[in-house]
Amino acid sequence: MSLLIKGASVLGAEPTDVYVENGVISAVGRAVSAGERVETDTVVDADGLVLLPGLVDLHTHLRQPGREDAETVSSGAAAAAAGGFTAVLAMANTSPVTDTAEAAVSVWELGREAGLADVFPVGAVTKALAGEELAELSLMNRSRAGVRVFSDDGRCVSDPRVMRRALEYVKAFGGVISQHSQDPSLAPYGSACCHEGELSGRLGLPGWPGVAEEVIVARDVMLARHTGSRVHVAHASTAGTVEVLRWAKAQAEKDGTWAVTAEVTPHHLLLTTDLLAGYDPTFKVNPPLRPAEDVEALRAALADGTIDAVATDHAPHARQDKEHAFVDAAFGMLGLEEALSVVSTVMVSSGLMDWAAVARAMSFTPARIAGLEGHGRPIEVGEPANLTLVDPAATYLVDRDRSLSLSRNNPWHDRKLTGRVVSTYLRGNRTFGG
Ligand SMILES: NC(=O)N[C@@H](CC(=O)O)C(=O)O
Ligand SMILES: [Zn+2]
Ligand SMILES: [Zn+2]
């Protein structure tokens, strides 16, 4: 099995050829197609296209087990491949929760069977996400699924004593706690359903102030420093969080004994709270969409590296859970298929980031944070051919009905985006596109 990708701009640099044999990159350079290696099973003309390392999503919700009507591991992996992802981390808030080694291995195996993207289960921090007793962190880590990222996402590990113990525990095997930062006494789950501000008052919706995120981020970086461990801030959404991160990263660098990393979602990079004026539950998400000042701060933080990664927080929901009055609808929106296009539109077209920076934020760094092998690797000889081809000039209108996800809660429907995934390869096998 061999594949020749001709004339691709690797990470936005001068066009070159990439030759793949048996799932591994075997040559890179302009001479490849001119030389002796013309006998290739598949030749892909990549003129005008950008070649990136396969994207890695630190934050995906697949709904298997429990809500296979909203998403399965297989449908989610198909959506991931369509979005240019070759690896996704599947959050633990399934039913039952991924809080045992058996549950983690089962998700991992479903991913293997689907064969469309590598699916790495995230383990719960606490049993049943109840926030009280630590889950089987070490057993999940030592299982075949090799879990390194733990999160109660959907819920905050709000008890500081539990968070401290979790950080101490994962330190032993180089794990990381990904925190859904929401102080439930400042922003009660379920009821606080949009950004607290002038608009929430006018709409009569109970709000969730930015400080409910910021106090947890501030607390957690101090706990990470105290324990000498690693914390990852999931879906950062406010300018205040960015300020705390800036300070904390400078301290962590000085100390060299602990670490804090952070992700931002595509929707928090583009959408603002005023979309809620129409009461459309598609835009109901946790953390909520914020005002334009926060969006600006998040873009700047991603561009300067204060925020390390883009992660989708792909959160599929069945129609019957979304089609309700705003206050009663489920939280969450789809994200896998359009993530690269949103980043391209918001960050690349504006000149805030180049393609090398996109590769860092959507592949190299997330793979490093999650401790993945074989993903987020440079496009070099000997590396696994996990690759994504992007047409940087393609402009298209998003159509939610063309999605490979089983759900339709797509916030990008009818929006014009620039930059589109053309094809995705997992170890040299095409998992999406032509
Ligand atoms: N983001 C959301 O609004 N919802 C997520 C949970 C979460 O990420 O907090 C979900 O599981 O649906
Ligand atoms: Zn969350
Ligand atoms: Zn989430």
Image (cartoon, rainbow, N blue to C red):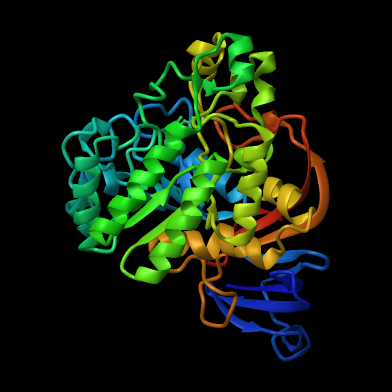
Tag count in the figure? Answer: 0
Front residue of 243 and 184: 243
Residue 308 placement (x, y as % from top left): 52, 58
Residue 191 lies, with reference to residue 4, above or below; the image says: above
Q: Is residue 177 visible?
A: no
Across and down, in percent, residue 346 comes to: 73, 48
The residue lying at 75 percent from left, 71 percent from top is 8
Instruction: Identify the image quadrant of the C terminus.
Output: bottom right
Q: Residue at x 40, y 70 (%)?
A: 254
Image location (x, y in percent) of residue 272: 66, 31
Q: In the current view of this chain or complex, which residue is farthest to the bottom?
A: 36
Residue 324 seen in the figure:
yes
In the rendered view, does 8 fall on the left or right side of 281?
Answer: right
Residue at 62 percent across and 61 percent down: it is 304
**Residue drawn at point x = 82 percent, y = 51 percent:** 394
Question: Image quadrant for the N terminus?
Answer: bottom right
Q: Which one is nearer the viewer's eye here, 376 or 16?
A: 376
**Residue 184 in which image quadrant:** top left
Residue 259 in the image: state x and y as whole percent.
37, 61
- The answer to whether residue 66 is above or below residue 58 is above
Nearer to us in this view, 136 or 43: 136
Q: Is 160 positioned to the left or the right of 317 in the image?
A: left
